[in-house]
Image (tube, grey):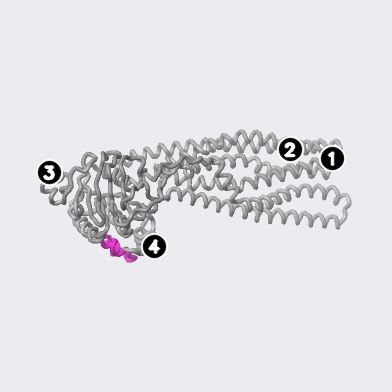
């Protein structure tokens, strides 16, 4: 795996352009239908003016019938165009939001980690609220264009009656949009900050849920809740600021729109009084002044939604544009399953060097838990190969030269705090549904009592993060999943810290039996697992200081005896 090249950032504007380009067909159809809706809405007062102008003067039943039929056509057009136009746009909006949610989630699920300075709760907010608000651009643009159609139709109709009325509408619309465009920038900045603070509050909640039991255990729950209350209050204050800005924006838009409608009505009344327009044209002008309020309101709100979509897109770009921690190489390891750590320097590790031969069961007793965690992080490729000294080889190949797929296929590092997912016992053990080694893994991990305890057996429902399981049950479930994967090289990090001594003894024997002929490395201080290993390596002061069987070390190494004897 090589150092990743600096990728050209993909800003929020590029994300919005991608969303628009992918939905161009739906947007064109939606724009046509919504433009037809706005044109028909605007045609209603124009038709009323023409009816007053001609039908009432002629007093002809035929003309009245034609007028009523025309109004029926206009109303039908308004109804159907709105219905189908919004259906097309909302379907495209929902589909596009789904695409971005999947894409953000895929970034978190990729084998190669990304350098994202966001917590899981913040990424959740990006994948939900920000994805939805970004996809809103699919509706915003057609509605903006259709509102412009209504304003143009109204301005043209009023210009035919009197040029001054048309110019008043156009000049007023430009003035309103100029004022609101300035205000919308503040909304975009405030919304982006609100989303960030809400995301931080969500991340704090996720942390609290994960650590709730330990917090209760040492009485730290009140302090933790206080910290969350502070973060939540910060998000609340920003939400109030955004609401205040939005309220000011909406109030200003409503006032300006009403002022323009009033100006058009008063001007039309004055022109009618002067005899420069007819009564029918006056009715049309007053009607348009009322009907134009809706498209003007919609038109004036669009800049706000554009800025909100832009702000959300910028937050999505933080995840989507984040560079990979490493760039995988093209090679694959040789068969056999050897694992070699050659002079690795990272964190507390000060030149660790050892080899686990193919088919060997080796345990490492780390006197400092941090050293075991650092070694597990290196082996799991959670640390980029270029970020530490030395080299790790799998199957004779440097891990930095292997593709990440090859690493995951041949080497599995099971952390001590392996995640448990909502689903069933079966789906947690065998997420891919391959059905391999499930029974053997359940038996080896001593999960049999959990399966037997429930009528559904392996199909027993497991809640998110294993909330309905004890700590020991969650740990054994995670171990069963690692064993069922049956990889050439398996690294287990403290797999039995939450189980009792008797169960631990049985698990140690079962794992050694099940993994016979496969390469296994266990980072542990468990006497049962250390005794089951072919040999034990002592990790002290960041280096391997001793190597022998567990029983020989107990007999001849006092420090080892004090560290692992229970």
Q: Secondary structure at mark 4?
A: loop
Give the spatial CA distance, label 4 vs label 1.
Answer: 78 Å
Front residue of 403/298: it is 403
Mark positioned earlier in the residue sequence (1 or 3): 1
Mark positioned earlier in the residue sequence (4 or 1): 1
Mark positioned earlier in the residue sequence (2 or 4): 2
> In terms of secondary structure, what is the magenta stretch mainly?
helix
Above or below: residue 369 compared with residue 495:
above
> Which callout, 2 or 4, points to the residue nearer the camera?
4
Residue 69: give x, y in percent of width and height.
Answer: 79, 57
CB contact under 8 Å: marks 2 and 4? no
Residue holding disc 3: 558
Front residue of 205/511: it is 511
Give the spatial CA distance, label 1 vs label 2.
Answer: 19 Å
CB contact under 8 Å: marks 3 and 2? no
Above or below: residue 153 compared with residue 172:
below
Q: Secondary structure at mark 2?
A: helix
* Range drawn in magenta: 438-457
> Which callout, 3 or 2, points to the residue nearer the camera?
3
Callout 3: 10 Å neighbours few (<14), some, many (20+)? few
> Which callout, 4 or 1, points to the residue nearer the camera?
4
Q: Is residue 67 visible?
A: yes
CB contact under 8 Å: marks 1 and 2? no
Residue in the image at 61% along x and 52% along y: 89
> Which callout, 1 or 3, points to the residue nearer the camera?
3
Give the spatial CA distance, label 3 vs label 4.
Answer: 48 Å
Give the spatial CA distance, label 2 vs label 4.
Answer: 64 Å
Residue holding disc 2: 170
For the image, the number of numbered tags is 4
């Amino acid at each position: 795996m090589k150092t990743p090249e600096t990728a050209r950032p993909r800003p929020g504007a590029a994300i919005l352009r991608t969303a628009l380009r992918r939905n161009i067909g739906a947007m064109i159809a939606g724009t046509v239908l919504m433009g037809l809706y706005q044109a028909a809405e605007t045609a209603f007062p124009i038709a009323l003016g023409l009816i007053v102008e001609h039908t009432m003067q002629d007093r002809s039943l035929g003309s009245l019938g034609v007028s009523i039929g025309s109004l029926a056509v206009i109303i039908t057009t308004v109804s159907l165009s709105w219905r189908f136009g919004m259906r097309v746009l909302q379907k495209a909006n929902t589909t596009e939001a789904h695409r971005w949610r999947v894409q953000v989630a895929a970034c978190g699920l990729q084998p190669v980690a990304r350098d994202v300075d966001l917590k899981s709760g913040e990424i959740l907010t990006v994948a939900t609220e920000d994805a939805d608000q970004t996809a809103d651009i699919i509706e915003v643009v057609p509605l903006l264009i259709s509102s412009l159609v209504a304003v143009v139709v109204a301005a043209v109709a009023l210009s035919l009656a009197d040029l001054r009325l048309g110019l008043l509408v156009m000049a007023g619309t430009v003035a309103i949009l100029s004022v609101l465009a300035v205000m919308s920038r503040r909304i975009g900045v405030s919304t982006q900050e609100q989303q960030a603070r809400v995301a931080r509050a969500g991340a704090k909640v996720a942390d609290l849920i994960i650590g709730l039991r330990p917090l209760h255990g040492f009485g730290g729950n009140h302090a933790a809740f206080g910290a969350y209350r502070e973060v939540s209050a910060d998000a609340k204050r920003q939400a109030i600021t955004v609401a205040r800005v939005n309220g000011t924006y909406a109030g200003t838009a409503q006032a300006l729109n009403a002022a323009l409608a009033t100006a058009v009505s008063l001007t039309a009344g004055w022109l009618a009084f002067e005899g420069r327009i007819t009564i029918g044209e006056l009715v049309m002008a007053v009607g348009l002044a009322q009907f134009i309020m809706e498209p003007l309101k919609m038109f004036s709100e669009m800049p706000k939604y554009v800025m909100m979509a832009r702000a959300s897109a910028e937050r999505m770009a933080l995840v989507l544009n984040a560079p990979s921690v490493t760039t995988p190489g093209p090679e694959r390891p040789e068969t056999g399953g050897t694992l070699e750590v050659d002079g690795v320097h990272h964190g507390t590790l000060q030149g660790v060097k050892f080899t686990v031969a193919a088919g060997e069961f080796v345990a490492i007793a780390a006197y400092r838990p941090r050293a075991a965690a650092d070694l597990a992080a290196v082996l799991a490729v959670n640390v980029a190969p270029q970020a530490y000294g030395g080299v790790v080889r799998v199957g004779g190949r440097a891990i930095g030269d292997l593709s990440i797929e090859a690493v995951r296929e041949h080497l599995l590092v099971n952390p001590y705090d392996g995640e448990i997912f909502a689903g069933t016992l079966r789906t947690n053990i065998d997420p891919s549904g391959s059905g391999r080694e499930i029974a053997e893994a359940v038996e080896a991990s001593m999960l049999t009592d959990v399966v037997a305890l429930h009528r559904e057996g392996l199909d027993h429902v497991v809640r998110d993060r294993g909330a309905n399981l004890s700590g020991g049950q969650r740990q054994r479930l995670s171990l069963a999943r690692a064993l069922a994967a049956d990889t050439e090289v398996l690294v287990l990090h403290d797999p039995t810290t939450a189980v009792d001594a008797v169960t631990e003894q049985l698990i140690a024997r079962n794992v050694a039996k099940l993994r016979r002929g496969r390469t296994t490395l266990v980072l542990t201080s468990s006497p049962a697992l250390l005794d089951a290993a072919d040999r034990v390596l002592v990790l002290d002061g960041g280096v391997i200081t001793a190597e022998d069987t567990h029983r020989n070390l107990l007999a001849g190494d006092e420090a080892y005896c004090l560290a692992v004897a229970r």
